[in-house]
Image: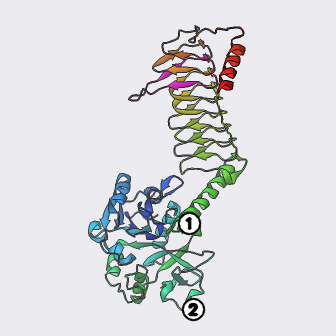
């Protein structure tokens, strides 16, 4: 990497009409994170001095998403092409003396190391005027073409609309991403015209303008996935599928077992340890960490949760934000946890809701137990001590504390604290009336017959 300062210009002014959405195109998520945020995270790895996002339609949405991530906003009031869009950053950059990366908000998965390679090529011994990121898609379609020699020196770049049949036969395509010295970029853009089929100011024209000055430009190549753009819901789904497939492969490379890989859904920040087993149809929302040796069973959904070493989750479990499972803890089928901690070796085996609670090590929560944490206005916590046993179908009305080693009898509704090692029984005594059921049936049958 050059030691010169770096600026990134991210183009995000397009209408995105093919998405047919009230949400700006670049804010649609891939792996639970807006496309624009994916890209800005990669830029952040380069320690850029300036990051500019060029906005147009639905400016307020993009600005609200980009500014908390450290980006500056500039506006393109008229949509007059990519060259014109980049020009909108000129005044804000104010004669920036450094390198400039030009990126696209709807091309979210380009990696930081690819960006570094572009900057490194810009400062190669032959000092190209610009570096273009190229790729070879399976179907070149309507992409602009890059005509280059074996050393990557560009002879010509042409938009598909303006390309000859011979040029369209070339499969090296222009991703649109470029690296240019700041001293060159805006001087070249000022000379770009719009005498083309679309009447727009094309950014790639700076390559040919530099060539007319006797300065060559260069192309480096990357894989198609990194530079896949999104213009429609179908393309969004396809890119999501590519991302998921790559993440599943990486999880298995890193030592996790995925029983049915195609059915597991990761998020951009999911962390999975070694010797983790993930059964079919598991969904990881944002903010999940799974420690070594844990098992996530089928049809479970986790979000904002931490699963400890050798813990066991599911099947059909839901861990909501703030759920923390200690080592060898167990959350079984049809159990929901939220803002709750389950100590080492504690068990909630089935059909329970544990919310706003702290459950001690080795405690056992019986089936059908709930922590009643909400009174319609405020939330309250429940504390269950180490080794406590909560009988089935119990309701713990918070705020309440169950002491260590205490036992709560099945069917209890607990509204007061239970002391350590005490037994709490909160239910009406059972009564029996011999013969009552037979008499009841006889009376009711007579009433029915009389009608």
Residue at point 45%, 78% (across, down): 128
As for residue 290 lying within the magenta part, the answer is no
Q: Position of residue 159 (x, y in %)?
A: 48, 84
Residue at point 65%, 50% (across, down): 264
Which element carries disc 1, helix, strand or loop? helix
Which element carries disc 2, helix, strand or loop? helix
Q: Out of 50 and 285, give the one closest to the viewer.
A: 285
Left or right for 248, reference 164: right
Would you say residue 49 is visible in this rendering? no
- Colouring: rainbow
Give the mark, 2 or 1, whose residue is nearer the N terminus. Answer: 2
Residue 409, image quadrant: top right
Q: Which mark is residue 165?
A: 2
Q: Which mark is residue 368?
A: none
Q: Position of residue 49 (x, y in %)?
A: 35, 59
Q: Out of 115 and 321, give the one closest to the viewer.
A: 321
Asked if 295 appears above or below 242 in the picture, the reply is: above
Residue 350, image quadrant: top right
Is most of the magenta stretch helix, strand or loop? loop
Residue at point 66%, 36% (across, down): 314
Q: Position of residue 275 (x, y in %)?
A: 70, 41
Residue 181, image quadrant: bottom left
In magenta, the rendered stretch is 366-392
As for residue 386 lying within the magenta part, the answer is yes
Left or right for 256, reference 358: right
Would you say residue 162 is visible in this rendering? yes
Q: Which mark is residue 234?
A: 1
Q: Position of residue 363 (x, y in %)?
A: 61, 20
Asked if 417 appears above or below 284 in the picture, the reply is: above
């Amino acid at each position: 990497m050059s030691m010169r300062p770096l600026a990134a210009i991210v183009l995000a002014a397009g209408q995105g009409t093919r998405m047919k959405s009230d949400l700006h195109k670049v804010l649609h998520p891939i792996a639970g994170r807006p496309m624009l945020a994916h890209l800005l995270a990669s830029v952040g790895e380069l320690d850029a001095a300036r990051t500019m996002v060029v906005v147009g339609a639905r400016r307020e949405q993009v600005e609200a998403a980009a500014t908390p991530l450290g980006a500056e906003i500039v506006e393109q009031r008229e949509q007059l092409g990519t060259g014109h869009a980049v020009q909108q950053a000129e005044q804000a950059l104010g004669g920036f003396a450094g390198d400039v990366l030009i990126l696209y908000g709807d091309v979210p998965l380009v990696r930081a190391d690819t960006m570094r390679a572009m900057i490194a090529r810009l400062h190669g011994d032959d000092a190209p005027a610009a570096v273009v990121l190229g790729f070879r898609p399976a179907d070149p379609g309507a992409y602009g073409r890059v005509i280059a020699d074996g050393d990557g020196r560009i002879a010509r770049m042409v938009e598909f609309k303006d390309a000859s049949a011979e040029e369209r036969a070339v499969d090296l395509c222009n991703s649109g991403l470029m690296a240019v010295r700041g001293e060159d970029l805006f001087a070249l853009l000022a000379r770009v015209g719009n005498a083309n089929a679309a009447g727009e100011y094309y950014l790639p024209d700076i390559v040919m303008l530099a060539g007319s000055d006797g300065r060559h430009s260069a192309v480096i190549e990357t894989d198609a996935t990194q530079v896949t753009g999104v213009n429609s819901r179908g393309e969004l789904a396809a890119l999501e599928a590519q991302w998921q497939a790559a993440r599943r492969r990486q999880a298995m490379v890193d030592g996790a077992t995925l029983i049915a890989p195609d059915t597991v859904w990761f998020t951009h920040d999911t962390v999975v340890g070694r010797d983790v087993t993930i059964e079919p149809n598991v969904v990881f929302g944002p903010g999940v960490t799974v420690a070594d040796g844990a098992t996530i069973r089928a049809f479970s959904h986790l979000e904002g949760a931490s699963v400890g070493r050798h813990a066991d989750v599911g099947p059909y479990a839901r861990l909501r934000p703030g759920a923390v499972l200690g080592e060898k803890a167990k959350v079984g089928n049809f159990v929901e946890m939220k803002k709750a901690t389950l100590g080492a070796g504690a068990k909630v085996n089935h059909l329970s809701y544990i919310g706003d609670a702290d459950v001690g090590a080795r405690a056992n929560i019986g089936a059908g137990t709930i922590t009643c944490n909400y009174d319609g206005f405020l939330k309250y916590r429940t504390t269950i001590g180490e080794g406590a046993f909560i009988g089935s179908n119990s309701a713990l009305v918070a705020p309440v504390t169950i002491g260590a080693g205490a036992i709560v009898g099945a069917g209890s509704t607990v509204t007061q604290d239970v002391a350590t090692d005490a037994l709490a029984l909160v239910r009406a005594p059972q009564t029996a009336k011999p013969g009552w059921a037979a008499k009841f049936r006889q009376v009711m049958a007579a009433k029915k017959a009389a009608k």
